[in-house]
Image (tube, coloured by chain):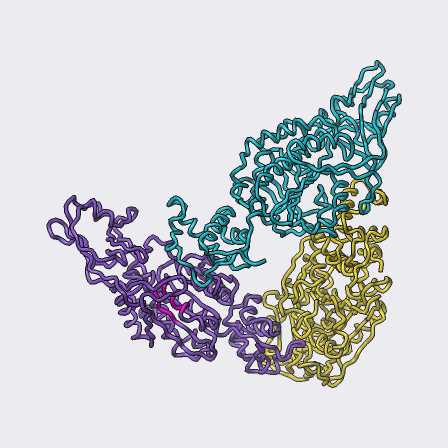
Chain colours: A purple, B cyan, C yellow
Amino acid sequence: MNTSQLETNSAPNEVGQEMYQLIRELFPICRSITGNGFRETLDIIKKYIPLAVHKVPTGTRVFDWTVPKEWNIRDAYIKNAAGQKIIDFRNSNLHVLSYSVPVNARMSLGELREHLFTLPDHPDWIPFRTSYFTENWGFCLSHKRYLGLEDCEYEVCIDSSLEDGSLTYGEFYLEGESTDEVLLSCHTCHPSLCNDNLSGVALTTFLAKHLSSLALRYSYRFLFIPGMIGSITWLSLNEDKVPRIRHGLVVACVGDPGPLTYKRSRQGDAEIDQAVAHVLKHSGHDYEIEDFIPFGYDERQYCSPGFDLPVGSLTRTPHGRYPEYHTSADNLDLVQPEYLADSFSKYLAVLDVLEGNGKYLNTNPKCEPQLGKRGLYEAIGGQANRKASQLAMLWVLNLSDGKHTLLDIAERSGLQFSLVRHTADLLLDHGLLQEAPE
Amino acid sequence: MNTSQLETNSAPNEVGQEMYQLIRELFPICRSITGNGFRETLDIIKKYIPLAVHKVPTGTRVFDWTVPKEWNIRDAYIKNAAGQKIIDFRNSNLHVLSYSVPVNARMSLGELREHLFTLPDHPDWIPFRTSYFTENWGFCLSHKRYLGLEDCEYEVCIDSSLEDGSLTYGEFYLEGESTDEVLLSCHTCHPSLCNDNLSGVALTTFLAKHLSSLALRYSYRFLFIPGMIGSITWLSLNEDKVPRIRHGLVVACVGDPGPLTYKRSRQGDAEIDQAVAHVLKHSGHDYEIEDFIPFGYDERQYCSPGFDLPVGSLTRTPHGRYPEYHTSADNLDLVQPEYLADSFSKYLAVLDVLEGNGKYLNTNPKCEPQLGKRGLYEAIGGQANRKASQLAMLWVLNLSDGKHTLLDIAERSGLQFSLVRHTADLLLDHGLLQEAPE
Amino acid sequence: MNTSQLETNSAPNEVGQEMYQLIRELFPICRSITGNGFRETLDIIKKYIPLAVHKVPTGTRVFDWTVPKEWNIRDAYIKNAAGQKIIDFRNSNLHVLSYSVPVNARMSLGELREHLFTLPDHPDWIPFRTSYFTENWGFCLSHKRYLGLEDCEYEVCIDSSLEDGSLTYGEFYLEGESTDEVLLSCHTCHPSLCNDNLSGVALTTFLAKHLSSLALRYSYRFLFIPGMIGSITWLSLNEDKVPRIRHGLVVACVGDPGPLTYKRSRQGDAEIDQAVAHVLKHSGHDYEIEDFIPFGYDERQYCSPGFDLPVGSLTRTPHGRYPEYHTSADNLDLVQPEYLADSFSKYLAVLDVLEGNGKYLNTNPKCEPQLGKRGLYEAIGGQANRKASQLAMLWVLNLSDGKHTLLDIAERSGLQFSLVRHTADLLLDHGLLQEAPE
């Protein structure tokens, strides 16, 4: 594994543009937790990475849950008395309550209103609503449009189907030196919403693509799943693989302008928690770190007490805290390439810490070794960095007692992980360090 | 055990009035660490709870101490040259130095002054003074009166006796489901002083009365003892019972207007310490929490290193920190029903935490169970509470791994114990939790 | 061991003057890490304490290092074209780059400049520079003098020798009751620099002299060594003694006006770290406490991972943080008797804590013992101190459970160690404490 590749081979700005293009391509598709839109999405991702596509039949028991019927939709609209389509699914797939059962009826405004959802506080925006586990149908529309509805008879059509089929998910396993795994999981079930979570889908795709070109210490597992039922399904069908997961992140909301926000794993002090905290602390940007709570995305399942996996969630503005959340305003304007690129860099920096976080033994543990006679003072770049580099050597030598990881050393010394890692490589090359036994 | 009884059956205001009436009834009695006044007090408490009265003979060795002679007093006064009683025990039993030996003599003002105690900083108040372990006699009086003493011959009479007898204490043992005990101990030895400690006596009495009507998890032991020598005596004679004490509180100074103040046990992080801290933190009122120091009331003995019991002390203003402390101003004006009622509620809330602080196992530990299909979203009251209640369910399920108590869960989630407890009951009813093995 | 001796026998002001006189006597000698100047210095210290002088031959392998050649210098100067000595070693031994190889040559100003060192920011001061492990020669001079150099041919002479010889160090072992040791180590290799480190040499000398008159619990080892190579040499040749070192301090920079500064041992919470922190906290003066870093003086070697000794460093202003550091301005004006005396007192107070930091058992662990019947209330001095002393007795009794040292008790109670120690002695005398088994 060569971590400098991990850090330097990435061209964030270019990757930011590529992620944005992928989001733009995926945006129009009507996704839900099952159905053709989900599969169409995976087909597009397969252009970037060799995704395995798994189908789990409706009715499969997954722990306390059952894989639901598959939902597909062809068309939906509301016509007024004049026969004009006043709401048209083809304009925005958010218009239809996700998992709406088919309907084809005429009704009064009063009856129709029972099935309409709006956001009075944001009268121009269409809300995103779902009814996965209770049969219902409905339309979402802007409050402004809602207020303009005339009192007449309406024709309502939802040309959907809710039938036995399958739950589909995408999985890409990238084999590294070790069978220990890093899990990267993104929910891929939302329709035309950019930050939540096409941004996460795009970032996961490009991370996978980028890592594919590198020799890696860990194996990596990338999951593109429907939220909640997807992680429950994967965990249920892959219990044998769970013990290999050493670190993990749930990838979501990574394209908005907000600061990076990390939600710790249930364990709270796992290596992933330390690694993310280190990267954010040294990033020079604002950030937030929050404790685990059993609410949010799929970390709820990964961190359930029967698994208690070291899986946190690294987002920009977390779900529910930006006004555009779950509305038509979570669109291609909210998400921007520069924020995607920044998130990509931070994720890479975190993985760089995980990949390089070894534990070493000073081969001359009694007193300092003589750095000068090995040319190690000269080994270091410019005069300006010489003192910092020398200090890094002394720290790495002093704490390489088989108990401290390089991240521990970075934290105790206050130095950046990359410098500590680079220094350890240099000392390894000179025989002053050796790998610590497990 | 039904903790909702513990919380809802109490009518604090009514209980506050009843406690105040008991204090009023006990106020005139001249108590000391031994003697008839102490027994008379226990007889009155017996009207509320079936107290066992124990007598320990003078001279009994109790660890490093010896049960002292019994002190009784019938009358005491100082007459001036004109034969007028200028100090009269019948006006206030504080006038006599507690444990004064008998005296019947005539003396000059100069000689008398050696035996007079006043408070120059509070010239209207009579101090409370004792001489339990050194034979002496004396009178306490207001400094104003002291300054007005004329230079004449005085007749001094203390009609007391200091003879072999016994040390008396009251004990009420309330049997619960478990032989593990909660200890509630109050010093009952002070004469006409309300906050210190008729307030504690009354609170302990009414707690005992209230708990008597409930089915309880723990057994409870209520001790009405003379301060210091009483706890030493009880511990010495009941060493076999000590290991059963799982939690304890020393009850004192609970009727003044000051904020609740908790003094931690010597252990510092015992369950009682956590429980009291939780209740105070969520009370919405000011409060103080202080570390243990080996000074104060009977917690000094319970927390001596040979016992190191998890016993703290929950007071309002602690001893020595309010100006009326150990003076005639610690009277029926200082203590008020509303403060007694508030203290009573807080004590009940603490006991409610102890009673309900179970440890459970999530029966579906892998991923979340499906709450909707069990009607658990609807099980919850108003729309407004739905989100909080759902979060409480998720927290209880997530942390019920046999390692976290409900109090741990309340602390980690920031939720109130009562909500967590109620939620756990609901989940138990639905088979989603089971009791954790010990 | 009688710690009151340790504290009261010292007359700090007088000792401050004596230390200053020793510094004055040692100041003119040209020391380096080897050579006659170092030995001459040890000869003077031997007038105060019976120092053993060890010689380690050039070429001896000491861990990763080799004892260097011995350097001696007789004379050095630069003459201008007029034959005037414009730089003369006899005026200041700082003028010569330490470990300069011999040179006797004529050269232009341009050639000479390659070998001149100045401090442009402090144009009146001569810097102190060394070249121990790379053969070189050079002169140090004030920048003002440097700027005035005329463009002519110069005669340059360094009459030095760099030959096989030995590294010399001084060692004084003071036997106490136990073979467990306290290490006090000072680097003695600098030429005419007062704070760094004649101040440390003088303080170590007078501590050794003072402790020699006392009965001590610990044995003490005082090392007067060349910095870096000296501690490496000592550790390499005395590995068998290392496990006896229970506490240690590196003594340096103890004569300037700055506040006391403690650099913790690598362990960070060793008894020496606690003891120094306690003394500084109760000193009533400003102070700093800093975490260990693997940079500085010989604590770098004592705290290398193969030894990880509990050795901190107690200085006034640490090396490199005062402008006079390693310049001719670190002279007899910078260091003053009053600061030396204050440092001496603080060191003694720290050793007093170490010497007296016993662990005891309350012989009456169940409830408090009766202090009154043993006259212990009266045992205590003035009325004013009575309450503090009584509280100290209660704290010592309460925490003497074989788990808490007296320093632990002082820290938990907030009381000063000396009061806790005195109280423990009193309780020992009355049979209320006994020594805890190891």
Percent across and percent down for residue B138 are 82, 28
Q: In the figure, residue A210 lies in which quadrant?
A: bottom left
Whether B201 is drawn above or below A100: the answer is above
Vertical order, C164 against C86 (above or below)? below
First to last magenta residue range? A222-236
**Residue shown at 46%/72% (left/top)?**
A352
Lateral position of residue B86 relative to residue A351, left or right: right
Residue lying farthest to the left in this orientation:
A82
Q: Is residue B412 visible?
A: yes
The extreme top residue here reads: B82
- The location of residue B184, given as percent across then percent down, is 66, 42
Image: C1 above or below B339: below
Q: Nearest the camera: B128 or B229?
A: B229
Q: Image quadrant of residue A104? A: bottom left
Instruction: Give coordinates of residue B156: x percent, y percent.
Output: 85, 22
Residue at left offset 74%, top offset 28%: B30
